[in-house]
């Protein structure tokens, strides 16, 4: 009788594991200053953040069409190397077509209601 481990099943079927993928690149603003863009895909949402400078804090970023195209391009580079599945790639393409920064941007914990 073979013993099955839950992690072994998760490795065999990566689509069933929770998808949390980070993508990052550098952009330049209108003044020619570089800033880092980070897009985190998790739980059916994309969290867009940006940071300018080494010791600066991450802040919310509203993506433009170039950022969305770059996200799909970065995801398509990971697809042939099997770092993401085809299903995850289709989900990223679908999510990147949504407008706005995403529903969970800047919200890392649940806010308790005022009593």
Image: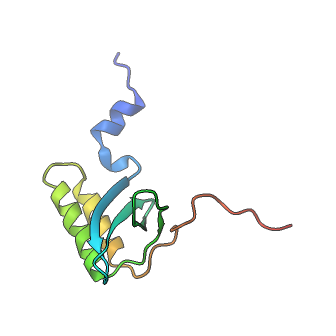
Q: Residue at x 54, y 66 (%)?
A: 106
Q: Residue at x 19, y 67 (%)?
A: 73
Image quadrant in which you'd find residue 107: bottom right
Q: Quadrant of the N terminus?
A: top left
Whether residue 64 is situated above or below residue 39 in the rendered picture: below
Q: Position of residue 108 (x, y in %)?
A: 57, 59
Q: Nearer the viewer, residue 10 or 112?
A: 112
Say whether residue 44 is left or right of residue 75. right
Q: How many marks?
A: 0
Q: Residue furthest right?
A: 115
Indicate the colouring scheme. rainbow
Image quadrant in which you'd find residue 66: bottom left
Q: Quadrant of the C terminus?
A: bottom right
Q: Position of residue 2 (x, y in %)?
A: 34, 18
Q: Position of residue 50 (x, y in %)?
A: 41, 67
Q: Position of residue 94 (x, y in %)?
A: 32, 73
Q: Residue furthest top?
A: 1
Q: Nearer the viewer, residue 106 or 12?
A: 106
Q: Residue at x 38, y 46 (%)?
A: 17
Q: Residue at x 23, y 61 (%)?
A: 75
Q: Nearer the viewer, residue 80 or 51?
A: 51
Whether residue 69 is situated above or below residue 82 in the rendered picture: below
């Amino acid at each position: 009788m073979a013993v099955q481990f839950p992690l072994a099943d998760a490795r065999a079927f990566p689509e069933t594991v929770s998808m949390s993928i980070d993508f990052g690149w550098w952009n330049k603003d209108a003044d020619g200053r570089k800033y880092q863009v980070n897009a985190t895909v998790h739980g059916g949402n994309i969290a867009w953040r940006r940071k300018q400078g080494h010791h600066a804090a991450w802040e919310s970023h509203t993506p433009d069409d170039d950022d969305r195209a770059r996200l799909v391009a970065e995801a398509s580079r990971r697809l042939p190397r099997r770092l993401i599945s085809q299903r995850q790639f289709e989900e990223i393409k679908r999510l990147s077509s949504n407008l706005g920064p995403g529903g969970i941007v800047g919200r890392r914990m649940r806010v308790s209601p005022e009593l």
